[in-house]
Image (tube, rainbow, N blue to C red):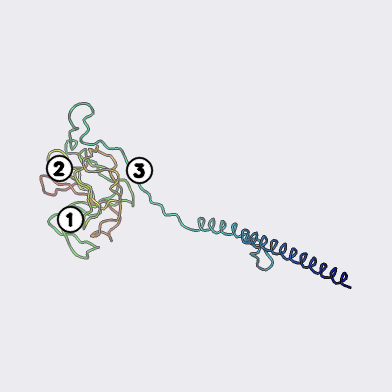
Amino acid sequence: MRSERYEQEQTKKQNFRYTMIAVFCALVVLAGAVYTVRANPQWIAKWDGRTLDINNENENRRTEDLQTTPIKTQDVSKPVPTVDSKDDKGTGTARQNTAGGAVMVQPVKGEISKKFSPEAPVYSATLDQYTVHNGVDIDAELSAQVCAAAEGTVTKVYNDDKLGLTIEITHADGLITKYSNLSTDKMVGEGDVVTKGQVISGIGDTALFESIEPTHLHFEVWKDGAPVDPEKYFK
């Protein structure tokens, strides 16, 4: 009787061991499954019975964004190398500035829409009033190339409160040319020596006091400190 009870107790202990081993194995398998699912979320990302590959979905969204997002571009003229006035080219002296015998080229191709009028006021559509005009306005398309009217040295590059981005070039015989309403100041800098016809910038829309006027270059010529009619110097 005692032997039979002993055998039953041993059988129960053995069954308990098997049960614990089975539970442990099940936990190991469950833990492995959880890890695998977490490492591969696309296996359980389902909707309407369709498996969604999350990585591919994100890649597709990035591709669609690139295709639908407009790319902003600007027609900017390429910089033209200039000769610094400090360069002597081996001669020991800087290049001399001349105004080409006081003959200039028109700095941009186009019609002159507003004449030189330093005494008689002319109407300004932007200001809605009559004001004097110390230069000429030459109509041209936005970003059209602007060139130096004559050989000279760039003496100023600045933003004028009224006429916008401006480049000033000093020539021989007391002549100065000013180019306003420009698009960029990256092509030439102060101290650069430029040749007649060399591109120095482009037409912009930076002139606050002429913003309603058609796109144009505001061009001035000064002689011995006073404004003069630029058309007198054009070929």
Report whether 38 appears left or right of 171. right
Mark 2 or 1: the one toward you: 2
2 vs 3, front mark: 3
Q: CA distance from mark 2 to mark 3?
A: 28 Å
Q: Residue tagged by mark 2?
A: 175
Amino acid identity at mark 3: Lys
> Residue most toward the top?
91
Which of the pair 129/82 is nearer the observer?
Answer: 82
Whole-Å distance between the Cαs marked 2 and 1? 18 Å
**Mark toward the start of the polypeptide (2 vs 1):** 1
- The dot on residue 79 is none
The residue at which mark 1 appears reads as 133
Residue 206 rendering spot, x and y as whole percentages: 27, 56
Quadrant hosting residue 35: bottom right
Residue 11 image position (x, y, % from top left) = 83, 67
Quadrant of the rendered image containing residue 28: bottom right
| Residue mark closest to the camera, 1 vs 3 | 3
Identify the element where label 3 is drawn. loop
Answer with mark 2 or mark 3, whichever residue precedes in sequence: 3
Q: Residues within 10 Å of mark 1 (few under 14, many from 20)?
A: many
Would you place residue 168 above or below residue 36 in this image? above
Earlier along the polypeptide chain: callout 1 or callout 3? 3
Q: Nearer the viewer, residue 121 or 153?
A: 153
Residue at 67% in and 68% down = 48
User: On the image, numbered disc 3 is attached to which residue?
Assistant: 78
